[in-house]
Amino acid sequence: METPDRKQAELVARQEAAHLTAQGVRAVALTWVDNAGITRVKVVPTARLAAAARRGVGMSPVFDVYLVDDSSTTSTHIGGPDGDLRLFPDLDRLTPLAAQPGLAWAPVDRYEQGGAPYPACQRQFARRMTERAAAHGLRLRMGFETEWTVARTDGAELRYPTEGPAYGMTRVVDLSDYLVEVCDALAAQQLEVLQIHPEYSPGQFEVSVAADGPVGAADTAVLVRETVRAVSVRHGMTALFAPVIEAGSVGNGAHLHLSLWEGEHNLCRGGDGPYGMTKLGESFLAGVLEELPALLALGAPSVASYLRLAPSRWAGAFQCWGPENREAALRFIPGAPDDPEGANAEVKCFDAAANPYLVTGGVIAAGLAGIDAGLSLPAPVSGDPALVGGADRLPDSLTGALEHFERSALLREALGDPLFDAVAAVRRAEAELFAGAAPQAIADATRGRY
C-alpha cells in the first residue's frame, strides 16, 4: 500500500542513499530480531534503499516460529510456508557500520502485504507500550548492558585470548587494541560509551552505552552487539553472547537499566517512597517485580538461560529487590545527590538470548500495570538471598518460566494473541529440543547462536 508517508520515506531514502554512496557504502543490512532472540537480516544494495523505503522488502512470517537451531515450530496464528511480510527500514536509525566498511544498518518495522501493521512485529510492540506509557504522561529511559565472551575457536575447542584475572587490568593490557577499536567503532556510529571493562569469566567483557527511549534502546542493543561481533572478527576472534559459554561458570547477562520520567522529573528520586522513589516510580517497579516470573519467558528465553540464572552469581535468581544489591533480580540504584539522571533500576535476570524489543515492551506493560493497581514494593532484601532468605526463587527452568508466562493475562493483552502465542510456541519447542540434554551440550549448542 502506498501512502504519503511512504512517498516521503522514499524521498528521504534517496537523499540518504546519495550520502551513503558518497561515503563508499554499497549495501544496507535491514535487521529484526525473532522470538528465539536471533537477529535476522535482509541486505539491499544502497541503490535499492529508496525502493525498500517505498514498498518494503519481502520476508516470510515463519521466522517468528524459528528456534535457536534454525528448525521451526508452529503456533495458532503463525507457521508454515504461506504468506509474506514487508520490511520497512527506520531511516532515523540508518547507520554506516564502522567495523564493516561498505555496509550500513537500519532496523525494520514489519507490515502486512496490504499495509496494516503486522501484529507479531516485536519492534512495533515495544513502540505500542512506549505510547501506552505516554498516555499515562510517562516516558522511559532504558539501556542494556552488553556482556560477551571473546574467544579463538579451533573446532570445538575454545581458547581465550587473555589469561588475566576477573575485572583485572591485565585483560585490558592484553587486548587494548581490540577494546579501543570497539570504543572507536561505537563512537563512530554516534553511540556514547559509558564504560567498557573486563568481567568475571575467562575472556568476558562488558560495554555500557547511554540510555535512550525503549525502542531506541532495543535498536542500540542490536547495533552494539553486531559492532562487537564485527570488531572481534577483524581481530581474528569470535564474540559469544550466549547466556553460558561453559556450563557451571558465570554467564553473559544483558541487564536492563530503566528510569521512569514525568516531564523532566525522574520518578526514581525526589519522593517519599523507599530510597527516595516517588509513588509512581515505586508502583512501576513493584509491577515489574511482581511479573518477573512471567517476564523471564521474554528476558531469559533460552534453555541455556537457566544455566546462567543460578544463585550467588550476581545473576538475579531471586524475586526480590534491594538498593545496590547485585544478587537481587531488581537492583535499585539511588544515584548521587547531584546527578538527577543517576537514579534507576537494573533488571539483572535477563540475558542476551532475549529479543530486546520484547524485553522493553514487556517491562513497560508490567510496570504500568503496577501503577494502575497502586502496588507497593515489599521490604528490600540485603545480602545474598540464597544465604539470608527473604525471597522466592525465580523459575529455574524455561518450562517453569513458560508456565508463568502462559498464565499471564497481563502479557497476553499487551503482546496480543498472535505474538503471545508465537513466543509461547517457540519457548515450548526449545524446551522440548533440549529435553534431557547435559548442561555442557546445551551450552555448546547455543553459545554461538545469538
Image (spheres, rainbow, N blue to C red):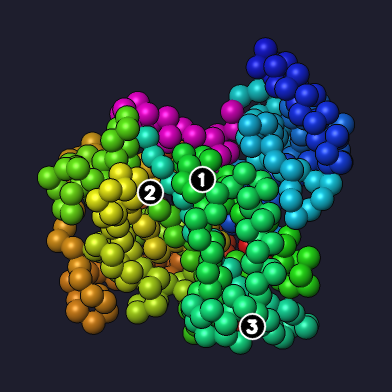
What percent of the width, then of the height, locates residue 197?
52, 69
Sequence-first tag of 3 and 1: 3
| Residue under pointer 2 | 258
Q: Is residue 284 above or below residue 240?
A: above
Residue at 72% across, 16% down: 7
Q: Which label was assigned to residue 217?
A: 1
Is 239 or 15 nearer to us in this picture?
A: 15
Please identify, in this view, whether the residue under mark 3 or under mark 1 is nearer the observer: 3
Q: Is residue 424 above or below residue 16?
A: below
Q: Which label was assigned to residue 162?
A: 3
Q: Residue 137 magenta-drawn?
A: yes
Question: Quick one: SS at disc 2?
Answer: strand
| Residue 110 visible in this rendered orientation of the protein | no
What percent of the width, then of the height, locates residue 384?
26, 77
Q: Which residues are magenta?
A: 117-138
| Residue 294 visible in this rendered orientation of the protein | yes
Q: CA distance from mark 3 to mark 1?
A: 30 Å
Q: Is residue 389 above or below residue 367?
A: below
Residue 149, picture quadrant:
bottom right
Q: Is residue 160 left or right of residue 246?
A: right
Residue 148, picture quadrant:
bottom right
Q: CA distance from mark 1 to mark 2?
A: 10 Å
Taking the view exactly as shown, the residue that stands out farthest to the front is 338
Residue at 35% across, 26% down: 135
Q: Type of residue at label 2?
A: Leu
Q: Is residue 438 left or right of residue 60?
A: left
Q: Type of residue at label 3?
A: Thr
